[in-house]
Image: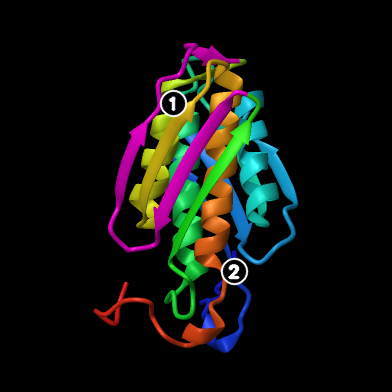
Amino acid sequence: MSNIVPSIAQNLPRIAEVQRNTAETRVAVRVNLDGTGKASLNSGIGFLDHMLDQIARHGLIDMDIECAGDLHIDGHHTVEDIGITLGQAFAKAIGDKKGIRRYGHAYVPLDEALSRVVIDFSGRPGLHMDVKFTAGSIGQLDTQLVFEFFQGFVNHAGVTLHIDNLKGFNAHHQCETIFKAFARAMRFALEHDERMAGVIPSTKGAL
């Protein structure tokens, strides 16, 4: 496992690896926040892998996720624990947050569906999600677990996240616009801001 301590000011790669093992799941995550969108994903839930791939491709994040979970019970522990571990990996990879834009937002449409995501790498966990899925499941993914994924992520990445599905009657489209907008918003927030090089984007001097 890498011992890299990332810092934008030092132009070091923002890469992290995290493993999380419990009686319910074994999760291994590796992220490169300055990647090209390559992903190797094996959650055991096909539609979740499809959504995680949206994060990688639209966020330009290289991401490896491997999870062995208690899917014989249901998908709850797997989805939540992947969100937790991914959040931990992001927090580790971002480092001191010097020089990042910090805030990001995106609107993404897919046919009749439209979602908006706004993110702040504030250091303060908070999830505000207004999504009324029109179906209880998409493939093997219980749509209630989308909230659990993002709750796990924000708690451990230390971000404030607002997710609103503004339109849509196809649950697949609703969910895909959410994950694509999340990726696009995060991509912007994590970009290097040349005018803020070496500066933490907060009047507090810390995030």
Q: Are marks 2 and 1 in contact (CB under 8 Å)?
A: no
The residue that disc 1 covers is 145
Amino acid beneath label 1: Leu
Magenta-colored span: 112-138
Q: Quadrant of residue 49?
A: top right
Whether the magenta-drawn stretch holds residue 125 is answered as yes
Along the viewing direction, whichever of 112 and 118 lies nearer the viewer: 112
Characterize the local packing of mark 2: few (<14), some (14-19) or many (20 or more) Cα atoms within 10 angstroms.
few
Q: Secondary structure at mark 2?
A: loop
The residue that disc 2 covers is 2
Disc 2 to disc 1, C-alpha distance: 30 Å
Residue 74 spot, x, y in % from top left: 48, 17
Q: Residue at x 56, y 26 (%)?
A: 113
Q: How many numbered badges does the structure rendering display?
A: 2
Q: Quadrant of residue 162?
A: top left
Q: Is residue 18 visible?
A: no
Characterize the local packing of mark 1: few (<14), some (14-19) or many (20 or more) Cα atoms within 10 angstroms.
some
